[in-house]
Amino acid sequence: MKISTLAAGSLFVAVAMPAAAVETIYTAVLNGASEAPPNDSPAYGTATVTIDLDNGTMRVQESFSDLVAGVSASHIHCCTEIPRMGVAGVATPIPTFTGFPSGVMSGVYDHTFDMTLASSYNPAFVDDNGGTVDGAFGTLVAGLNSGTAYANIHTSEYPGGEIRGFLAPIPEPETYAMLLAGLGIISMVARRRRA
């Protein structure tokens, strides 16, 4: 009786939760070893990309340090043939992200793009994906979800990219909460059967 009451209560809480925006966060560690081909740059960085499907936006946050030369460009490339390896064309604005710091060897960046606008993409990426921003956005999100999109920072010393990292989704907190609730119920059932 107690277990079924707990399960019903957990179900009620899950159903009663307020609807949240359809938002997915992707992260990557950027380094020279992840480039194709790999390089021995001492630089490192992080990238966080937040996709909000309800609002059609993409927030890009990057931090980087110790580049061996000044930044010449930064973008998201999509989509490689094999997850977490290979190279792909530029999906986001060219020659670089809007307002990305140029000529520096360390820095931070934070910008939200309106993905309903053609200016948020490389025109060739739009053309290759049905000629529409909807097609381009769908392909980019699919690439982020499948591990075939990567953040890349290019410099004058490494024009093909000094540091990069493949973006991967972070599980939502609700996923962890549901997992923990499920494990708790399984544990209670196991204890009850032993008793």
Image: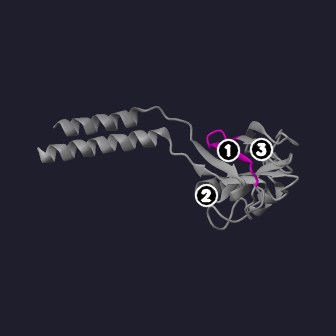
Mark 3 and mark 2: span between their CA atoms?
26 Å
Point out residue 30 in the picture as x, y percentages from the top left corner: 69, 50
The amino acid type found where label 2 is placed reads: Gly
Q: Which residues are magenta?
A: 41-61
The amino acid type found where label 3 is placed reads: Asp
User: Closer to the camera: disc 2 or disc 1?
Assistant: 1
Point out residue 105 in the picture as x, y percentages from the top left corner: 82, 42
**Residue at the location (59% across, 54% down)?**
145
Kindly give the residue lying farthest to the left in the view shown.
195
Q: Quadrant of the C terminus?
A: top left
Q: What residue does disc 1 label?
A: 46
Q: How many marks?
A: 3
Secondary structure beneath dot 1 equals strand
Mark 1 and mark 3: span between their CA atoms?
13 Å
Could you tell which of marks 2 and 1 lies nearer the N-terminus?
A: 1
**Residue at the location (68% across, 64% down)?**
80
Choose top left, top right, bottom left or bottom right for residue 130: bottom right
Magenta region includes residue 55: yes
Numbered mark located on residue 9 in the image: none
State yes or no: discs 2 and 1 in contact (Cβ < 8 Å).
Answer: no
Point out residue 29 in the picture as x, y percentages from the top left corner: 65, 48
Q: What residue does disc 2 label?
A: 147
User: Closer to the camera: disc 1 or disc 3?
Assistant: 3
Q: Nearer the viewer, residue 23 or 49?
A: 49
The colour scheme used to paint the residues is one colour
